[in-house]
Amino acid sequence: MLHELPKVYGEYVFNFPLKDLSFLGVGGVCDVLFRPKNYDDLACFLRNKPNELEITVLGNLSNVLILDGGIRGCVITLPKSLDDAIFLQNKLIAGAGVILTQLIRRCLELNISCCEKLIGIPGTLGGAIAMNAGIPDFEISDVLESVTGIDFNGHNLVFAKDDINMQYRDGCIPEGVVIISATLKTHHKTEKEIMKDIDSVLLKRKNSQPIGQKTCGSTFKNPIGIKAWQLIKAANCDKLRIGDAAVSDVHCNFLVNLGNAKALDFLCLIKMIKEKVFEKTEVLLEEEVVIIGENL
């Protein structure tokens, strides 16, 4: 099938080592990585690709654990340009591939308040929507108005926020749909007001998260009424380590790569934490990190 890939204006890279993109620094290769030049290029590819070709769409890989056997078929990463961001009255339309922090900085320049409470999350806008990224008092769904997507056959789709019924850490986007852009609600604030929120969030992250280390963000979702880190600590899992995969000593709901960890080390560590927490508390933790790919 890889010999039948359609002609594109973007780039194909065969046998691409996904650990080079991973925030955890782990993961095997994909058969082919496709970087479309723009969204028209993506649509053309999807309409003309071999029907049996497996498709995986990845954002900035900031909350993803890719297994050591890699990903079969074609992995697609989206254009990260801010050039196509459109600012209208009380609305913002932006491509799904744009890095969230860059979008927030652009809004700040224009005195536009939108999703500045998500500053410091290193994912893309599309990734933030796919997982309904958030902090305790804010989620991307709070400002989302609609999502434009394209299915794996190249058909355009539009979803109003109410159509997809977003949940805690789950954007509920239908399978087989690539998010290509989103419309967000905005309102005017002064630079000082926006910076107050940004500085507050960044200070909290600096003091409570392993900034600068190889990590994939929060590992587990918070169960109703309690924080995942509290359960992890109560089960004496806050100092666990398998190989170079370890529970962070800054925040025990974060796992870090201390050097040369493999994805299997993280997979085993996640399994161990879940078992120990359930044995101690009878609460079964659910992963927030997205685990994809194949084991060796």
Image: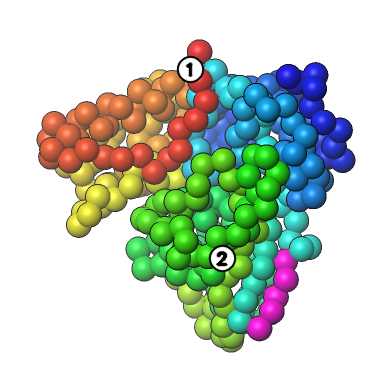
**Quarter occupied by residue 207:** bottom left
Q: Residue at x 80, y 19 (%)?
A: 3
Q: How is the image coloured?
A: rainbow
- Look at the magenta stretch and give its main secondary structure: strand
Q: Residue 25 location, x and y as percent?
A: 56, 31
Q: Residue at x 41, y 27 (%)?
A: 266
In the depicted view, which residue is nearer to us: 91 or 198?
91
Q: Is residue 193 left or right of residue 35?
A: left
Residue identifier under label 1? 295
Residue displayed at 83% across by 40% down: 10
- Residue 277 quadrant: top left
Is 86 covered by the magenta stretch? yes
Q: Position of residue 175 (x, y in %)?
A: 51, 42
Classify mark 2: helix, strand or loop.
Answer: strand
Query: Mark 2 vs mark 1: which is more N-terminal?
Result: 2
- Label of residue 146 in the image: 2
Q: Nearer the viewer, residue 125 or 179?
A: 179
